[in-house]
Image (cartoon, helix red, strand yellow):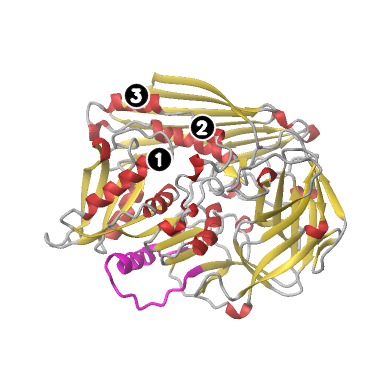
């Protein structure tokens, strides 16, 4: 049987400034005069080699169903012309509008274009939709966010995150990796050198923007949600922190919105880990047929479909979670009520309390929650008991089952004896063996007590502040007799960077309460979803925690070196990392040090290129220090090397 899909590569798409972007196209192999809708995925992750298998997988699936798939590398990445010098630049979004117009004008296109993507691709879909290119009719945004400062990998609760440094090393490899001479010809080395020279010390740049200023506001579509007019399908996982944006997007967008939230982390629904995953081809093609082909959908699809879990991912080690799929026809849901539990000296209470409690930590809290985005079972939040023992703990035993669905909110009235301080909250379920499993958490830099959209300010020591922490959204079933535990501390390390000196936090209990979104049992009906089992794993890093005398700790993380040959091009890809070495002494926070390194290599015949990035972060009382090293090797000989040291004023953390 003939292949129903025609693949075109390379395809060069012209954009403003006289540049051309490299693309691959999957086109239904039908009649020459037939016209199809097109779906664009627009990311900087090398469609000709590194992402080739994923792109082939999805491109063939779409084209076999009568939908053109276009995978385009952003300018300066892969084989596209130009330079890539940061995330989500205005030029990137303008180029996307040009690509959409080009796709709509092709003789095989019916004029309707959609955008899809996960992570960067999801960001891009939301950001381009806000520009309203005429041919863009709908988007699918997976594991993406509406707020770059509040809810991206750089700052966690307004504090510099470890993920920021790890992503900086990885992103430097994206910006600095070579184009392929088999695609662009003899000028490949000149283009590569230009990329290496243009690659900034991106960690220093991100650290220099320490609040939601104009830099982060660009591309934060939540600031002007009415700009998005096309239908939006939001997809996320409860184990992925980007799910925090769902409630805001639901509340803000007037365009048609649907959402699907599964048990998984930062991954595709059909490659779900933890599972169960979904038959995602069915779901996404239904969406495109409805909005790009004007196909009437007889299926009554609820606004929100989600997985209600009965355990946490850590309890299953990234395997399938017990639970079931259910749905809400509208959101916010009329089936959800708020249950308030007040913080009291004896635990959590149904009645308001009085008096005060103080917390002054002497040991590190957070070693059981090391990663903002856990990709492997070793990176998941582990048994929290040791961290709980170092925290201020409040407990409550449930007299009846509870389905907590939505965003738990914690209101606190507190004072700090230092001008820079944070508060962290962890909501856990304690099992019969006394193990404490993390259900949701949040951390807040108290300089942002007026919210993340306002300019922060240092605290007045001793002054009481009323703050709210929006914990990570959840859909979790607690059985009758379950023991809820709320644990408060002054930070979570190594998730975030510590304050320059340990603070004592004083809580006025009359102003402290936990608000849980509780869903009525009468609303809980199993919603049929086509499941797909067998998730994808990136492997398991070796994570070691060495707690030393005096409370200090060293955390090391190592990924095994990997290698893969791309059958279609005979290119051998390999790499290492991100590896990390982290140190913290709670008695002397200024000794904290993070080191992250990563490498990638491309080989085929006489073409052999490797890029290595290493970033070290430390701090004084007044400045952060970023020491960055970028190296490139050609045929195992040095081609490029740069070492740079930046000092960034330390104002609010």
Q: Position of residue 8 (x, y in %)?
A: 20, 48
In the drawing, does residue 348 fall left or right of residue 355? Answer: left
Which residue: 75% across, 70% down? Answer: 398
| Number of marks drawn | 3
Marks 3, 2: nearer the viewer = 2
The residue that appears at 67% across and 60% down in the rendered structure is 409
Crowding at dot 3, Cα within 10 Å, few <14 / some 14-19 / many 20+, comes out as: some
Residue labelled with disc 2: 205
Q: Is residue 263 visible?
A: no
Residue at 50%, 61% in the rendered image:
252
Along the line of sight, which residue is nearer the eye, 462 or 309? Answer: 462
Direction bottom: furthest residue = 522
In the image, residue 391 sits, relative to residue 316, either above or below, namely above
Question: What is the quadrant of the C terminus in the image?
Answer: top right
Disc 1 designates what residue? 89
Mark pair 3, 1: CA separation: 21 Å
Q: Which residues are magenta?
A: 276-305
Please say whether residue 280 is one of the residues in the magenta stretch: yes
* Label whose residue precedes the other's in the sequence (1 or 2): 1
Residue 553 is situated, as x and y percent measured from the top left of the image, at 71, 35
Mark 1: few/some/many CA within 10 Å (<14, 14-19, 20+): some
Give percent across and percent down for residue 403: 64, 70
The residue singled out by tag 3 in the image is: 193
Q: Does residue 609 appear in this view? A: yes
Q: Secondary structure at mark 2?
A: helix
- Give the answer, above or below, for where 642 lies relative to 120: above
Residue 336 bears which disc, if any?
A: none
Disc 1 + disc 2, Cβ < 8 Å: no
């Amino acid at each position: 049987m003939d292949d129903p899909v025609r693949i075109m590569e390379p395809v060069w798409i012209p954009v403003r400034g006289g540049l051309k972007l490299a693309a691959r196209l999957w086109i239904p192999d039908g009649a020459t005069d037939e016209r199809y809708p097109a779906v664009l995925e627009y990311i900087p992750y090398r469609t000709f080699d590194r992402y080739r298998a994923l792109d082939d997988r999805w491109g063939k699936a779409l084209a076999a169903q009568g939908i053109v798939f276009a995978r385009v590398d952003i300018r300066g990445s892969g084989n596209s012309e130009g330079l890539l010098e940061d995330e989500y630049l205005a030029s990137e979004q303008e180029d996307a509008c040009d690509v959409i117009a080009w796709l709509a004008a092709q003789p095989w296109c019916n004029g309707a274009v959609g955008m899809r993507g996960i992570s960067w691709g999801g960001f891009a879909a939301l950001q381009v939709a806000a520009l309203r290119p005429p041919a863009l009719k709908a988007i699918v945004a997976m594991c993406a966010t509406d707020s770059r400062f509040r809810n991206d990998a750089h700052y966690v609760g307004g504090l510099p995150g470890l993920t920021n440094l790890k992503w900086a090393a990885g992103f430097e490899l994206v910006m600095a990796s070579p184009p392929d001479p088999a695609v662009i010809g003899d000028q490949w080395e000149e283009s590569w050198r230009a990329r290496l020279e243009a690659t900034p010390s991106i960690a220093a740049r991100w650290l220099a923007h320490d609040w939601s200023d104009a830099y982060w506001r660009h591309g934060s579509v939540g600031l002007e949600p009415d700009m998005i007019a096309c239908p939006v399908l939001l997809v996320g996982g409860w184990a992925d922190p980007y799910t925090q944006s769902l409630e805001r997007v639901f509340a803000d967008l007037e365009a048609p919105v649907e959402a699907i939230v599964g048990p998984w982390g930062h991954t595709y629904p059909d490659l779900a880990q933890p599972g169960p995953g979904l038959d995602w081809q069915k779901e996404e093609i239904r969406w495109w047929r409805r909005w790009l082909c004007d196909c009437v959908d007889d299926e009554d699809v609820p606004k929100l479909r989600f997985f209600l879990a009965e355990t946490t991912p850590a309890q299953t080690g990234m395997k399938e979670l017990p639970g079931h799929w259910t749905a809400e026809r509208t959101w916010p849901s009329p089936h959800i009520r708020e249950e308030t539990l007040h913080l009291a000296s004896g635990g959590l209470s149904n009645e308001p309390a009085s008096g005060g409690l103080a917390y002054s930590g002497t040991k590190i809290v957070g070693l059981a929650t090391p990663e903002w985005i856990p990709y492997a079972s070793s990176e998941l939040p582990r048994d929290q008991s040791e961290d709980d023992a170092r925290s201020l703990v409040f407990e409550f035993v449930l007299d009846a089952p509870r389905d907590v669905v939505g965003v738990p909110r914690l209101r606190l009235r507190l004072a700090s004896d230092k001008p820079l301080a944070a508060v962290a909250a962890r909501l856990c379920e304690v099992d019969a063996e006394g193990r404490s499993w993390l259900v949701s958490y949040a951390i807040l830099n108290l300089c942002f007590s007026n919210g993340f959209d306002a300019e922060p300010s240092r605290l007045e020591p001793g002054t009481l502040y009323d703050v709210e922490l929006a914990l990570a959204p959840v859909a979790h079933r607690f059985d009758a007799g379950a023991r809820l535990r709320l644990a408060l501390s002054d930070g979570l390390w190594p998730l975030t960077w510590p304050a320059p000196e340990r603070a004592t936090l004083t809580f006025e209990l009359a102003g402290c309460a936990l608000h849980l979104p509780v869903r009525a049992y009468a609303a809980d009906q199993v919603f049929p979803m086509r499941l797909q089992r067998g998730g994808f794993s990136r492997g398991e890093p070796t994570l070691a925690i060495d707690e030393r005398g005096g409370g200090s700790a060293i955390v090391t993380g190592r990924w095994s070196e990997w290698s893969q040959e791309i059958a279609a091009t005979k290119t051998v890809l390999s790499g290492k990392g991100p590896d990390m070495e982290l140190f913290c002494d709670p008695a002397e926070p200024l000794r904290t040090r993070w080191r992250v390194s990563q490498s990638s290599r491309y080989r085929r015949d006489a073409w052999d290129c490797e890029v290595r990035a290493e970033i070290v972060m430390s701090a004084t009382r007044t400045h952060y220090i970023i020491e960055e090293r970028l190296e490139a090797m050609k045929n195992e000989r040095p081609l490029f090397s740069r070492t740079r040291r930046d000092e960034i004023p330390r104002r609010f953390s």
